[in-house]
Amino acid sequence: MKRLFCPWRIKYVTSEKSKDCIFCTKPIENKDEENYILLRGEYNFIILNLYPYNNGHLMIVPYKHTNDILSLDKETLQEMMFLLQVSIEALNNTMKPHGFNIGMNIGEVAGAGISEHLHLHVVPRWNGDSNFMVVIGDTKVIPEDLASTYKKLKPEIEKIYNEKKKY
């Protein structure tokens, strides 16, 4: 068996798991950099995924605690799509992906890791990012740490958000 060392994951492995919804608690802590919150909108916020499928994997999350997309009002849904555009433009400008996976896993049976609170995944993709490590080794390599990704994306997301919000 080959080993791939990921020392940053020890914090998650050894930490006590909260019973509270992280999508509700993280925004009220007001520790945006520590919690990797990239932007706060009126109805939604953008946050980096702590366990990304790829570098730049972020999520757009409504402040409303719900797992029912039918319960979201028009303003929340419209802002979610607006923040999706902002996110894609920022990721394109900073990370130059070749494509994206965008979606929601609604319900545990559909693969939602946090099934009690809706969130929209935005996963940048590059040609060849599904290489031998994933196919043969069943291991995903994430070459950039979250703090570096955060520092790269945050100013770009804020700039684009403020420019687009004027219209």
Image: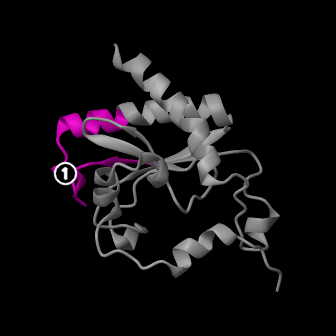
Instruction: Say above or below: 146 vs 116.
Output: above
Res. 97 image quadrant:
top right
Q: Kindly identify the residue that appears in the image at 49 percent across and 31 percent down.
A: 157
Q: Residue furthest bottom?
A: 1
Q: Residue 104: x percent and y percent?
A: 40, 54
- Residue 74 in the magenta stretch? The answer is yes
Res. 127 image quadrant:
top right
Nearer-the-camera pick, 11 or 23: 11
Residue with the mark numbered 1: 70
- Span shown in magenta: 59-81
Q: Residue 53: x percent and y percent?
A: 60, 58
Q: Which image quadrant: the N terminus?
A: bottom right
Nearer-the-camera pick, 37 or 167: 37
Instruction: Say above or below: 69 vs 110.
Output: above
Q: Relative to 62, is 153 on the left or the right?
A: right
Q: Residue 35: x percent and y percent?
A: 45, 54
Q: Which image quadrant: the C terminus?
A: top left
Q: Residue 160: x percent and y percent?
A: 48, 23
Q: Kindly identify the residue that appears in the image at 83 percent across and 81 percent down.
A: 2
Q: Kindly identify the residue that appears in the image at 60 percent across and 52 percent down.
A: 146
Q: Relative to 9, is 119 on the left or the right?
A: left
- Few, some or many residues within 10 Å of mark 1 (<14, 14–19, 20+): few
